[in-house]
Image (tube, rainbow, N blue to C red):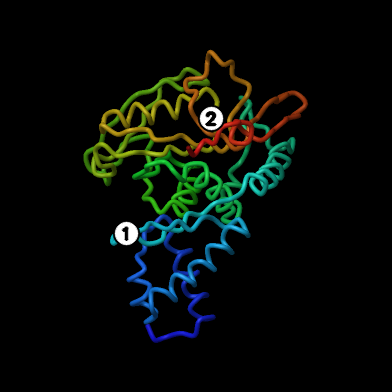
Amino acid sequence: MKKLKRSARLVEMTQYLLSRPHTLISLTAFADRYQSAKSSISEDLAIIKEVFEEDGLGQLSTLAGAAGGVKYMPMMSKNVSLAIIKNICRELEQPERVLPGGYLYMTDMLGQPNLMNEVGRMFATAFAHRDLDVIMTVETKGIPLAYATATFLNLPVVIVRRDNKVTEGSAVSINYVSGSNKRIQTMSLARRALKEQSRVLIIDDFMKAGGTVQGMMDLLYEFNATVAGVGVFVESGEVDRDERLLEDYVSLAKLTAVDLKTKQTSVAPGNYFTKSEEVSS
């Protein structure tokens, strides 16, 4: 790259960092890229760091030493996240979204890239400090959420199928009991899709009793993998606590009440906003 003026270098360097989240970039790499002294690069990074943190765009972490450098971690403040989630809750409370069984129609929202990017950034903030290798979801509605989250965490996505496909090669399949309707269902994951002993973040769009998430956790056991976190877009509060199959998860919204006769619902911010402790710790 040709030598740039400082103003142009700041713009290009910012874009470079934004497109490589959670990637350690050495000062030497920046100095070579922009044909500038490391001292100048350090000054530029200090400016970018200040703007990122003041505007709530994320953190720019510096690692000292010969193998050190800088790493951009996308973040979203709780205040900004809460404002977005409140708007989502109001949209989810529309009567026409109520489906039989106490579910909500969310497919149109899951198809909005800008909205999914905001939700993905929330999950990326919640799990920013977890040691993660991959993000997992089950087809099909969890896919947009998983990819949006993966974009900000810079991680690959693994998709669990409801049945085995010949195009996937050999696979591991398990039966699991749906927590909400107690039906036995099947899910499958290709052996090539996930390395053994991976640390996995599970992302799901809607959770009632947690049967689907528990199924994915059981499937991960077959790969000697570790569940490093569970993120749920919307959870149902219509399930008794003793029926809930898992307790350690992060939810962004919670369906607290639904009347199938009147189609009246109540949706509130999830436990990500009500927990006193930081879920990312």
Q: Mark 2 vs mark 1: which is more N-terminal?
A: 1
Percent across and percent down for residue 225 are 29, 34
Q: Is residue 21 left or right of residue 258?
A: left
Q: Please give the name of the residue rendered at 39% of the width and 80% of the height, measured from the top-left corner.
A: 36
| Residue 212: quarter of image | top left
Label 1 crowd bin: few (<14), some (14–19), many (20+), radius 10 Å = few
Q: Please give the name of the residue rendered at 61% of the width and 41% of the height, measured from the top-left corner.
A: 106
User: Are dots 2 and 1 in contact, CB under 8 Å?
Assistant: no
Q: What is the count of numbered marks?
A: 2
Query: How far, Cα to Cα, is label 2 from label 1?
Result: 44 Å
- Which of discs 2 and 1 lies nearer the camera? The answer is 1
Q: Please give the name of the residue rendered at 45% of the width and 85% of the height, measured from the top-left corner.
A: 4
Q: Is residue 40 above or below residue 256?
A: below
Q: Is residue 61 above or below residue 191?
A: below
Percent across and percent down for residue 73 are 47, 54
Percent across and percent down for residue 183 are 45, 19
Badge 1 marks a residue whose secondary structure is loop
Work out whether residue 103 or residue 279 is closer to the camera in this orientation and state it. Answer: 279
Q: Is residue 70 left or right of residue 6?
A: left
Q: Is residue 37 left or right of residue 43?
A: left
Amino acid marked by disc 1: Gly
Amino acid marked by disc 2: Met
Q: Which residue is mark 2?
A: 207
Work out whether residue 259 or residue 207 is closer to the camera in this orientation and state it. Answer: 207
Q: Which residue is mark 1?
A: 65
